[in-house]
Image (tube, coloured by chain):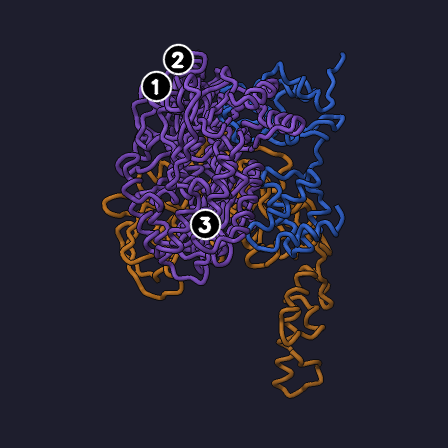
């Protein structure tokens, strides 16, 4: 790449043709190549990519070969933007050799992750030559691969800023400030949802949620006045309700999703039958 | 540091470029470490999540979250110093300051003596390669250091030989 | 007083020249970081006290470093009409003798290293000191100096870095004055482009092209930044350039800003360089007061100012995207390029980033022209480069030679070979990203392409000499340990790969390694090079790969034992 080559023109909607492993596909100019591959069911291994989050290029597994002027240059497909005539190959002997080495490193870094084990096995890597991490007190259970999806979802989508990367180099971990409880955590659990290796642990014992991996941060759960079930973090519900205009009625706010659905369905029936006495229709 | 001082520091850095690291650097220089309360206060004042600030101070080696001793001894570990015997300087300092051998390189973080008089740490390169090996005590640079010359340097800072 | 006209400019030059060549004797003491540390400060204070106590009519001035670091502390004496005399290895006890000699119109001959009768500062100004003291060798007769070609270091150690007048006296800011008052921005840009100047930070990207790309981007705001995060262990030329001649950097940036069309510049400097920060801050302040920075520079209508941003101890922040992150108050974790800085740099705006020495090359190009500049150096590698020659070498110091000079010339002719006469085994160039070059390849010329071809890089210009006692596997381990500690931890090949490389090297050095470990070491290194996100990781295994290639027998011996 030279300095003149700019990153894809964002917002352009030109349809272009790209070649992946010799087959042609249609894509939007500026689209992320890995996104195209996922849509078209072309297999490219990846751990740190999520379409709704900013690309990171951290896991290095999605590296593909870009063919240009008779040469093949390796680059990450999660940061590669599509242009007309782009020609990539997802597997060459060189790519496979490096991918296997990276998987060995992942097996050493996250030895307890079944996801990593099966991903590695798909490429014939069943053991690692490297010293395996084994920290009994690791709050992420020796499963974290530092893909950063949890940090990005917490900061970019939830606006939480609860967790961040701490330290640097081989000492890098994801944690809360001072590894303690973080009172600003909404307990939304988006971090655990996006985690590719299921490293983040959350428990829901009774009336509270414990973000076990995040300094055992405790978040109060809201109880449904109808069925009595604890269904969502209080603070998360408040944050979301505050964004809804016009505001929901208190009665509806407090209900769990199941009871709310039943309640609204019942209201619907009553409205249709002309009986308004059943309650508040201020929804 | 009181709140007023922190406000003054913040107001010195009005341009966005270089602001956050400038403020943190100023706190580090004055307090010789970054106290947790100040980090929390800064987070509230600047409306920046504490996690973000914590990430910064644990990433950049200039910041320390632990209080350091009265005198800070920094051994340069640049290439020229390495070739000229920085390892022996470090080991000798560890012996003189009664610190476990190898602890400084192993942990890569500052180690403080029990009496809180000295903190020993390593630096990547002072850029004083021509007078290697080099060490710094507080703000004083010492060139052409030798293991034999170290007790005399430490004595300038109140160190006395341990009588067993 | 702000300079607003040519008369005003000349006036200030005269003021400066009067300081540089006063009617009374002038004594200077080299007070860059290293000179100060080995006794310069003590000597300066002692001289100052004695001059005051004895009421002597002598001008005492602090200067930067003339580059012959092994001979520090260096003191110079200039009597009116006589040559400038360099004294070397001065110690505190010599000060009385120095003052006695100076008071009687002489110099202490036993301390004299050489004399300078006239000095061409290359900016249209030759300072003629005078003749006499013929028993002292001439500057050019000193082998360490004689083989050098000083362009960037032309003022270092001779002028007071904390006095803008002295910089003006030696032709400083005359290129900026010329450009702002008589040249169009495009002319300045064309000159730099045609000079062939390449980035001195290591990668060697054409500076003029980078300027042009930034200039052609459409944006309401653009920035230029000076990368002064000199992090390579063993390299300190940028520190000296800033400590000895800070205005040279400022002048280069003014010219760049004018050519590109930028109003705001930044110098990103590492926190480990407190003296350079102090001198730059002082220089910026003086330049503003003199109307050289700020609004309406030289009355030309062009406005530009420079701010300083300090680092906080992270080698990776020398990488361009990490550097930007650091200025913006984020952790220095690089992000993939594109977008490049010239598209979206500081605060998302087009940004031109150049190394200290790159900026410092600009004033002489504009002042003396492309033909003059391209005479220096080699094909596609024009100009000079400053190297820090350190380690097991006899004459330690800063060496400026034309690009294309051989390693032999630098290490043996300038450096006089191994310290204490020991045979030299190798040099290491380019810091943690570079490689170890065996003595049999010392006829390699130092230019961007030749060093790459043998597995090393120019980097910022550190040359660490290693003698026969050096264990090359230990050197590889040293660099990997450095890179592991400085890895940002974002991508796995660098974060985990380097850690395991270090563990492997530890095992091999402990005599517990096997042949298989050497294969793993090679394979792992190749993967780190091929798959790392940024330049730090991509080049970190170079010390391992070059020692495996050139000093394989040392690994084999450890594995077999």
Residue B81 or residue C368, whichever sits in front: C368
Q: Residues within 10 Å of mark 2 (few under 14, many from 20)?
A: some
Q: Chain of mark 3?
A: C
Q: Which chain is orange?
A: A
Q: Residue at x 30, y 34 (%)?
A: C377
Residue C518 or residue A112, whichever sits in front: C518
Q: Chain of mark 2?
A: C
Horizontal arrangement in the rendering, residue A46 relative to residue B16 (left or right): left
Contact, mark 1 vs mark 3 (Cβ under 8 Å): no
In the figure, C487 relative to C517: above or below? below
The residue wearing badge 3 is C9
Q: Which chain is purple?
A: C
In the rendered structure, which disc, 2 or 3, sits on the residue that comes first in sequence?
Answer: 3
Q: Residue at x 50, y 43 (%)?
A: C15
Task: Say which of marks 2 and 3 sits in front.
Answer: 3
Q: Which mark is residue C439?
A: 1
Q: Residues within 10 Å of mark 3 (few under 14, many from 20)?
A: some
Horizontal arrangement in the rendering, residue A49 relative to residue C438 (left or right): right
Q: CA distance from mark 2 to mark 1?
A: 10 Å
Q: Secondary structure at mark 3?
A: helix
Residue C346 or residue C476, whichever sits in front: C346
The residue wearing badge 2 is C423
In the figure, C504 relative to A211: above or below? above
In the rendered structure, which disc, 2 or 1, sits on the residue that comes first in sequence?
Answer: 2
Coordinates of residue A188 in the picture (x, y in percent): 62, 57
In the rendered structure, which disc, 1 or 3, sits on the residue that comes first in sequence?
Answer: 3
Q: CA distance from mark 1 to mark 3?
A: 51 Å
Q: Residue at x 69, y 38 (%)?
A: B32
Coordinates of residue A92 in the picture (x, y in percent): 31, 41
Q: Which chain is blue?
A: B
Q: Secondary structure at mark 1?
A: helix
């Amino acid at each position: 790449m030279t300095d003149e080559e700019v990153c894809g023109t964002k917002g352009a909607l030109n349809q272009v043709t790209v070649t992946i492993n010799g087959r042609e596909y249609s894509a939007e100019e500026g689209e992320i190549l890995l996104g195209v591959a996922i849509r078209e069911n072309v297999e490219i291994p990846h751990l740190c990519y999520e379409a709704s989050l900013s690309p990171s290029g951290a896991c290095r597994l999605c590296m593909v070969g870009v063919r240009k002027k008779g040469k093949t240059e390796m680059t990450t497909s999660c940061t590669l933007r599509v242009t007309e005539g782009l020609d990539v190959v997802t597997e060459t002997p060189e790519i496979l050799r490096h991918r296997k080495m990276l998987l060995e490193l992942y097996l050493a870094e996250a030895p307890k992750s079944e996801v990593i084990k099966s991903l590695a096995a798909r490429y014939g890597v069943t053991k690692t030559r490297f010293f395996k991490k084994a920290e009994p007190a690791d709050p992420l259970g020796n499963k974290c691969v530092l893909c950063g999806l949890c940090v990005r979802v917490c900061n970019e989508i939830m606006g939480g800023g609860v967790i961040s990367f701490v330290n640097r180099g081989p000492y890098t971990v994801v944690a809360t400030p001072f590894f303690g409880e973080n009172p600003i955590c909404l307990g939304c659990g988006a971090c655990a949802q996006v985690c590719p290796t299921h490293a983040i642990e959350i428990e829901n014992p009774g009336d509270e949620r414990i973000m076990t991996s995040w300094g055992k941060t405790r978040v109060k759960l809201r109880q449904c006045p109808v069925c009595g079930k604890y269904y969502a973090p209080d603070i998360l519900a408040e944050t979301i309700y505050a964004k809804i205009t016009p505001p929901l009625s208190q009665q509806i706010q407090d209900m769990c999703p199941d009871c709310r659905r039943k309640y609204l369905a019942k209201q619907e029936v009553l409205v249709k039958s002309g009986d308004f006495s059943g309650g508040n229709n201020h929804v | 540091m009181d709140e007023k001082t922190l406000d003054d520091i913040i107001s010195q850095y009005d341009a966005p470029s270089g602001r956050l690291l400038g403020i943190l650097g100023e706190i580090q220089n004055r307090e010789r470490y970054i106290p947790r309360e100040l980090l929390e206060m800064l987070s509230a004042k600047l409306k920046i999540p504490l996690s973000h600030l914590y990430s910064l101070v644990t990433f950049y080696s200039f910041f320390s979250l632990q209080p350091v001793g009265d005198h800070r001894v920094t051994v340069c570990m640049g290439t020229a110093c390495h070739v000229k015997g920085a390892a022996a300087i470090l080991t000798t300092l560890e012996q003189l300051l009664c610190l476990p051998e190898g602890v400084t390189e192993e942990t890569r973080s500052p180690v403080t003596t029990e009496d809180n008089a000295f903190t020993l740490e390593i630096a990547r390169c002072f850029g004083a390669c021509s007078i290697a090996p080099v060490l710094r005590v507080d703000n004083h640079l010492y060139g052409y250091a030798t293991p034999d010359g170290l007790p005399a340097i430490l004595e300038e800072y109140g160190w006395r030989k341990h009588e067993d | 007083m702000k300079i607003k006209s040519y008369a005003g400019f000349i006036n200030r030059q005269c003021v400066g020249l009067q300081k540089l060549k006063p009617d009374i004797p002038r004594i200077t003491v080299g007070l860059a970081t290293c000179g100060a540390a080995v006794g310069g400060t003590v000597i300066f204070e002692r001289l100052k006290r004695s001059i005051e106590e004895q009421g002597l009519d002598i001008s005492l001035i602090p200067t930067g470093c003339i580059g012959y670091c092994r001979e520090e502390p260096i003191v110079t004496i200039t009597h009116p009409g006589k040559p400038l005399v360099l004294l070397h290895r001065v110690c505190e006890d010599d000060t009385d003798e120095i003052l006695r000699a100076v008071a009687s119109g002489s110099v202490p001959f036993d301390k004299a290293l050489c004399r300078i009768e006239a000095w061409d500062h290359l900016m249209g100004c030759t300072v003629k000191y005078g003749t006499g003291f013929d028993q002292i060798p001439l500057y050019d007769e000193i082998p360490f100096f004689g083989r050098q070609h000083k362009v960037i270091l032309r003022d270092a150690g001779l002028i007071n870095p904390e006095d803008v007048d002295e910089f003006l006296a030696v032709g400083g800011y005359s290129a900026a004055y010329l450009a702002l008052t008589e040249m169009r921005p495009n002319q300045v840009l064309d000159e730099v482009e045609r000079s062939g100047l390449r980035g001195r930070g290591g990668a060697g990207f054409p500076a003029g092209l980078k300027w042009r790309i930034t200039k052609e981007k459409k944006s309401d705001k653009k920035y230029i930044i000076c990368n002064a995060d000199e992090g390579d262990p063993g390299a300190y030329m940028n520190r000296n350039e800033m400590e000895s001649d800070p205005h040279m950097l400022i002048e280069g940036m003014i010219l760049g800003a004018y050519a590109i069309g930028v109003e705001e510049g930044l110098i990103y400097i590492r926190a480990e360089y407190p003296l350079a920060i102090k001198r730059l801050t002082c220089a910026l302040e003086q330049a503003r007061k003199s109307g050289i920075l700020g609004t309406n520079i030289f009355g030309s209508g062009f406005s530009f100012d420079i701010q300083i941003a300090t680092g906080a101890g992270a080698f990776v922040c020398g990488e361009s995207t990490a550097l930007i992150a650091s200025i913006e108050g984020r952790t220095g974790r690089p992000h993939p390029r594109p977008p490049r800085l010239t598209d979206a740099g500081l605060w998302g705006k087009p940004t031109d980033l150049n190394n200290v020495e790159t900026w410092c090359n600009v004033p002489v190009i504009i002042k003396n022209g492309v033909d003059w500049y391209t005479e220096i150096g080699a094909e596609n590698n024009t100009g000079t480069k400053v190297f820090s020659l350190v380690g097991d070498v006899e004459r330690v110091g800063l060496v400026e030679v034309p690009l294309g000079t051989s390693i032999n010339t630098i290490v043996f002719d300038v450096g006089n070979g191994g310290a204490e006469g020991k045979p030299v085994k190798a040099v290491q160039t380019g810091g943690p990203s570079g490689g170890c070059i065996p003595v049999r390849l010392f006829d390699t010329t130092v230019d961007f392409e030749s060093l790459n071809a043998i597995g090393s890089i120019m980097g910022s210009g550190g040359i660490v000499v290693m003698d026969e006692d050096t264990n090359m596997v230990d050197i590889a381990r040293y660099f990997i340990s450095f890179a592991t500690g400085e890895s940002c931890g974002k991508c796995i090949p660098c974060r985990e790969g380097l850690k395991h490389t270090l563990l492997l090297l530890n095992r091999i050095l402990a005599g517990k390694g096997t042949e298989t470990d050497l294969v793993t070491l090679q394979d792992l290194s190749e993967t780190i090079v091929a798959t790392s996100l940024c330049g730090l990781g991509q080049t970190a295994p170079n010390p391992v790969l070059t020692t495996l290639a050139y000093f394989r027998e040392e690994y084999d011996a450890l594995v077999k034992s």
